[in-house]
Image (cartoon, rainbow, N blue to C red):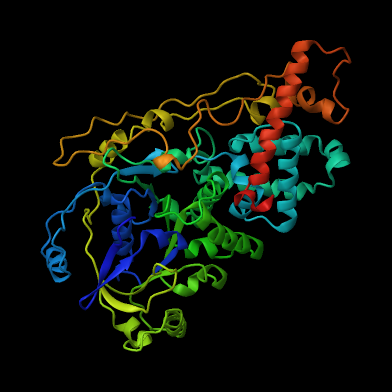
Amino acid sequence: MADAILLGKAGEAPVHLLPRMANRHGLIAGATGTGKTVTLRVIAEQMSRQGVPCFVADVKGDLAGLARPGAPNPKIAERAATLGMSGFAYRAAPVVFWDVYGERGLPLRATISELGPLLLARLLGLSDVQEAVLYLAFKVADDNGLLLLDLKDLQALLAFLDEKRDDVERHYGKIAPASLAAIQRGLLVLEQEGAEKFFGEPVVQLADLMRTDTQGRGAVNVLAAERLVNKPKLYSTVLLWLLSELWEQLPEVGDPEQPKLLFFFDEAHLLFNDAPKPLLEKIEQVTRLIRSKGVGVFYVTQNPLDVPDIVLGQLGNRVQHALRAFTVRDQKAVRAAAETFRLNPKLDVEKAIGELGVGEALISTLDEKGTPTPVERALVRPPETRLDVITDEERKAAIAASGLAETYGQAVDRESAHEILTGRAGARVKEGPPAGQPPAAPPVEDTPPVFKPGPARGSAPTPSEPPRRPPVLQREEGGIGGVLGGIFGTGGRQSRRETIGEAMAKSAARAVGSQVGRAIIRGILGGILK
């Protein structure tokens, strides 16, 4: 059985988080500067030491310090002594850096098909009518075995729908030109914001997020999000896509002794701002159901009111840092936070929330029976890793030590919808290697982690090589009319008897269409939409 994790002490009484209850999710809340990030860091450190991989979004740049041991600090030493932590030591966690833009970590990519029309519609800010047109575009791609991997694939498909609108409408329904134009403009905005780097291959394999090192410690995946968080919809879309992939691909495990993965959603209010009701319902469903896949989700936000009630009700482990009641809304948040804890007759919770100092928190976790413990006012334990930012050289050394740079460092541009619809089937367009190669790790006082290949504890899907989706077969005729003209009876393919090779090619193309269809149906939030 995994050891209970010490979060802090309430007087002389220790306050623990049970690993087997961590997949019941949690909330870390509090005003800016009250210690939320330190609490997140402590939980990630200790879970990693017990072999649990974690995924954290680093929105301020300071969580990168997880990769380095902490520097001796009198305040930290004093806190450790106050809590009676005789075995406290400064040590690094095995960190893997990721970055949607590929600048401060390994590129984190997804395909257009994997993202799906619902998440993409939210990312583009589409109306209901425009979203319906986007669904139609995905349906056309599905029916015709067109892979939608990156932005230019979707742009080429939309151009085709506009050019062949009369033929498409006879089979799929009316398409408003204004809606097509709105989607195209939205894609141009995404491209200008650098989001095109997120779409493409190779797609991250879940097994590479769920590794352990040779010491049995879980990998701490740190998403460099200092730049990404300035694009709130893209930020929340990336994290929600990852959650949906976990829900889709991981098997049911019930209640394991410890989670397979702990997922921290920092700045969680960005996920829920302006989210339509159907999306909120799906987020609530994923939060509730992903527990059975062994994944725990901790939402980190300033105000508990940022999280809708339907989601807040699923968060069993609560760490509440100070809230300052300067406004009417703040006062309401204090009352709401106080009322969500299990009552402790010895503690005035509403009063305590406003009195908490930095490094203090009100904590209520789940006991062995899954019952919330009475809330306690506790001193939070100090972290073991570096609180400051790390240097670029240290970051590059950690990226090199992960052993994944060769797998994800270079983009792959396979034959997909863009090549087929523009008559360039078979033309391979590959991006060059990223500028500069990571230098060898500089000498450091601690040994960098060495990761085991493959999934952690056999829990994640096995990575496949080559990439998961089969390539689209090269078409004989080029151009839009030649490639898809026969679909609507407008294009001029000569009727002739099939050869054995052609029959096999058609069978393979149908398999491709089925594969794309499954990806599209999965879209957002996995099998829930099936």
Point out residue 84 in the picture as x, y percentages from the top left corner. 15, 68
Of 53 and 396, nearer the camera is: 53
Q: Residue at x 73, y 18 (%)?
A: 505
Q: Is residue 233 toward the left or the right of residue 1 in the image?
A: right
Question: How many discs appear?
Answer: 0
Q: Is residue 25 toward the left or the right of residue 403 in the image?
A: right
| Any part of residue 246 in sight | yes
Q: Residue at x 47, y 41 (%)?
A: 460
Point out residue 211 in the picture as x, y percentages from the top left corner. 38, 41
Point out residue 311 in the picture as x, y percentages from the top left corner. 54, 67
The vertical placement of 402 against 173, above or below, is: above
Q: Is residue 217 toward the left or the right of residue 285 in the image?
A: left
The vertical placement of 427 against 22, above or below, is: above
Point out residue 379 in the picture as x, y percentages from the top left corner. 24, 73
Of 13 and 59, nearer the camera is: 13
Q: Residue at x 51, y 67 (%)?
A: 314
Of 100 and 316, nearer the camera is: 316
| Any part of residue 30 in sight | no
Q: Residue at x 14, y 71 (%)?
A: 82
Of 480 and 42, nearer the camera is: 42
Query: Toward which corner of the image does residue 365 lie, by quadrant?
Result: bottom left
